[in-house]
Image (tube, grey):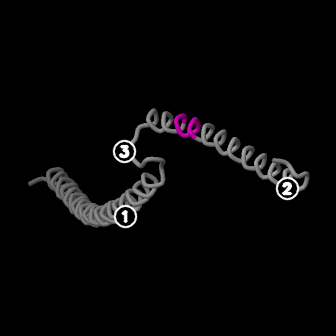
């Protein structure tokens, strides 16, 4: 083997050693990346689970609030808006009629009472 061949063989051996070291470094980096990915995946799963539980708790609170609001609404969920409006119109009409009747009764009672007093004071039939 000549000197040039030995030098060439030495260069090839050196390059192979560098390539092997680079490959080893890449393998270590890849393994570290895999570990980091697994760790992040587990963290993300835990965060998503906590987020899902928080959303479920908010949904329960929202359902309770919706039930309370439903109970407070006029007629509950039994009557529609049109039916509630119709009942309001009918109720207002009934109140007006009852008011007129009470007014007439009070006028009659006051008139009768004043008439009775005047008859007693003035001496009428």
Seen in the picture, residue 73 relative to 101 is either above or below; the reply is: below
Q: Disc 1 designates what residue?
A: 57
Residue depicted at 64% across the width and 41% down the height: 101
Picture coordinates of residue 117 (x, y %)?
84, 54
The quadrant where residue 9 appears = bottom left
In the image, residue 24 above or below residue 105: below
Q: CA distance from mark 3 to mark 1?
A: 28 Å
Q: Please determine whether, in this image, residue 88 is positioned above or below residue 54.
A: above
- Give the spatial CA distance, label 1 vs label 2: 79 Å
What range of the chain is rendered magenta?
89-94
Along the horizontal axis of the image, is 115 left or right of 106?
right
Callout in the foreground (3, 1): 3
Q: Magenta stretch: residue 93 in it?
A: yes
Mark number, residue 78: 3
> Which residue is rendered at x = 66% and y = 39% of the image?
100
Instruction: Please rate how many residues cluster around mark 1, counting C-alpha atoms within 10 Å: few if below 14, some from 14 to 19, many from 20.
Output: few
């Amino acid at each position: 083997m000549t000197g040039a061949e030995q030098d060439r063989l030495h260069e090839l051996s050196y390059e192979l050693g560098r390539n092997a070291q680079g490959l080893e470094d890449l393998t270590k980096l890849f393994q570290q990346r895999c570990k980091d990915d697994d760790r992040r995946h587990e963290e993300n799963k835990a965060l998503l689970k906590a987020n899902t539980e928080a959303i479920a708790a908010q949904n329960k609170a929202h359902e309770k609030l919706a039930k309370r609001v439903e109970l407070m609404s006029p007629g509950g969920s039994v009557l529609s808006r049109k039916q509630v409006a119709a009942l309001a119109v009918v109720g207002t009409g009934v109140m007006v009629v009852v008011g007129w009747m009470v007014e007439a009764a009070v006028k009659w009672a006051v008139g009768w009472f004043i008439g009775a007093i005047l008859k007693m004071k003035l001496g009428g039939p």
